[in-house]
Image (cartoon, rainbow, N blue to C red):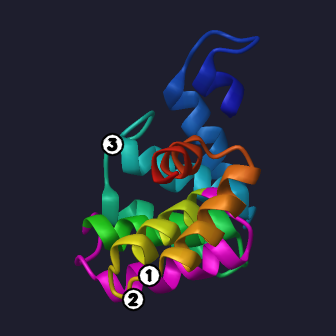
Amino acid sequence: GRCYLDGKGVVLDPSRGASLIQKSAAEGYAPAQVDLGSLYWEGRGVSRDEEKAVEYFRKAAGKNLPEAFYLLGRAYEEGRGVPKDGKLSLEWYLRGAEGGDPRAQSSLGVYYFYGRNVGGNRMEAERWFRKAADQGDGEAKKFLQSYY
């Protein structure tokens, strides 16, 4: 499915790629559920449907996939496919960050730095930014550079 989405080794065909990923997602493969949710989020190979995207992120989160936790946090932070809710966003980011997802770690760092739905705590923010930066997260690296 990813090959068709990216045109790697085959002719680029986002619809066919989405169809193949949908088959894996239907069989319960959590990474495919995240991929399919992301396709619905972006409207790539399928019609854009943020509520359906969140549905697939929840399925993957039910299998403890940290990337899904991050994506649910982002959905609640931005109010995409779900009502905007900073507290739920924080909870999902925390689960993703503790599970090792660098984007969730970086997002959690922002929450601690600016005191969003948590008390401002620069040391805690730095800790999460460092974890994300150590995994190559560019946003966390930029934030640490500007902080120092």
Q: Nearer the observer, disc 2 or disc 3?
A: 2
Q: Residue at x 68, y 69 (%)?
A: 66
Q: CA distance from mark 1 to mark 3?
A: 29 Å
Image-based side of 113 in relation to 100, left or right: left
Identified by mark 2, the residue type is Val
Classify 105 as above or below 139: below
**Residue at image mark 2:** 118
Q: Position of residue 12 (x, y in %)?
A: 57, 14
Residue 137 visible: yes
Label 1 SS: helix
In the image, taking residue 31 as reference, residue 46 lies left or right, namely left
Q: Which residue is mark 3?
A: 47
Residue type pointed to by label 3: Ser
Labels 2 and 1 touching (C-beta < 8 A): yes
Residue 107 is labelled as none
Question: Going 23% across and 76% down the picture, which residue do you hit?
Answer: 84
**Can you say which quadrant of the picture contains the N terminus?**
top right
Spatial CA span between label 2 and label 3: 36 Å
Vertical arrangement, residue 109 with respect to residue 89, above or below: above
Q: Nearer the viewer, mark 2 or mark 1?
A: 2
Give the labeled residue for mark 1.
90
Residue 44 location, quadrant: top left
Amino acid type for the residue under numbered disc 1: Leu
- Residues in magenta, as a range: 79-102
